[in-house]
Image (cartoon, helix red, strand yellow):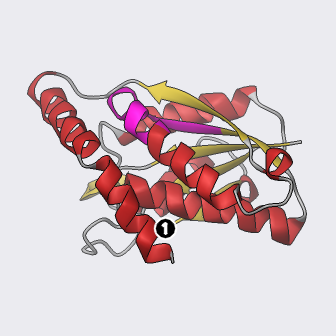
Amino acid sequence: MRFLIIISGPSIKFRESSVGGYEIGECLLPRLERGLTAWEEMAKDTLIIVSGGDGDGSRPIPSSTVMKQYLVEKGVPEKKIIEEPLATNTIENAMYCCKMMKDEQENNMLSINNVTLVTSDFHLERSRIIFEHFLARTFKEEEDAKQRSPTTSYLSAPNGVTGKRLQFFLEGEERAMNNLKKRLELYDTKKK
């Protein structure tokens, strides 16, 4: 049995800091800390996928690299962390992570039975819908899909923002939820 934690990463900001010139923002830090706590509580063979690209293409390294550096500094062995460096939004987080899970199962003949997604509290419901959509799509073609499709759980991290910033994120989530069906259909069409 293999456990997997996915930490969904928002974009990072370029500022002088101790992590390669990048600041881990107020939304990402609680996600990383919650993912780290979950990893410490799980089986020793648990893997972590850190998912996040460079957003608008202006950064020399993706969010996933900064996330990996942080987790390694906190004691997670580098070999337990898989980077997903391409995603620029939540739909791509799910799409690329699901593909990585399927590839991991096929190439290493490992069974990933349990997946835990870690994201911010305000972001959890939309993430859940998106990940369930892509898990079903990724594993539906398998003959024995019940065994191959992992059980999924969701952990919310504290929002990391309050007041007007939180309101900004909540309004963005509402807009994104309103457009979600259309956006998922667009990504489904791209795949064909």
Q: Is residue 121 magenta?
A: yes
Q: Is residue 58 magenta?
A: no
**Stretch in magenta:** 116-128
**Along the line of sight, the residue nearer the viewer: 94 or 189:** 189
| Residue 59 spot, x, y in % from top left | 30, 71
Residue at 83% over, 34% down: 43
**Along the line of sight, the residue nearer the viewer: 163 or 122:** 122
Residue at 30% over, 36% down: 26
Apparent side of residue 155 relative to residue 77 in the rendered image (left or right): left
Apparent side of residue 167 relative to residue 33 in the rendered image (left or right): left
Residue at 79% over, 52% down: 145
Task: Give amino acid for label 1.
Answer: Pro
| Residue 51 spot, x, y in % from top left | 50, 56
Apparent side of residue 115 relative to residue 129 in the rendered image (left or right): right
Q: Check disc 1 and report its element: helix, strand or loop.
A: loop
| Residue 87 spot, x, y in % from top left | 43, 64
**Along the line of sight, the residue nearer the viewer: 139 or 37:** 139
Q: Give the quarter of the image for residue 165.
A: top left
| Residue 96 spot, x, y in % from top left | 54, 64
Q: Which residue is mark 1?
A: 85
Q: Give the quarter of the image for residue 100.
A: bottom right
Instruction: Answer yes or no: is residue 12 visible.
Output: no
Q: Is residue 142 above or below residue 177?
A: below
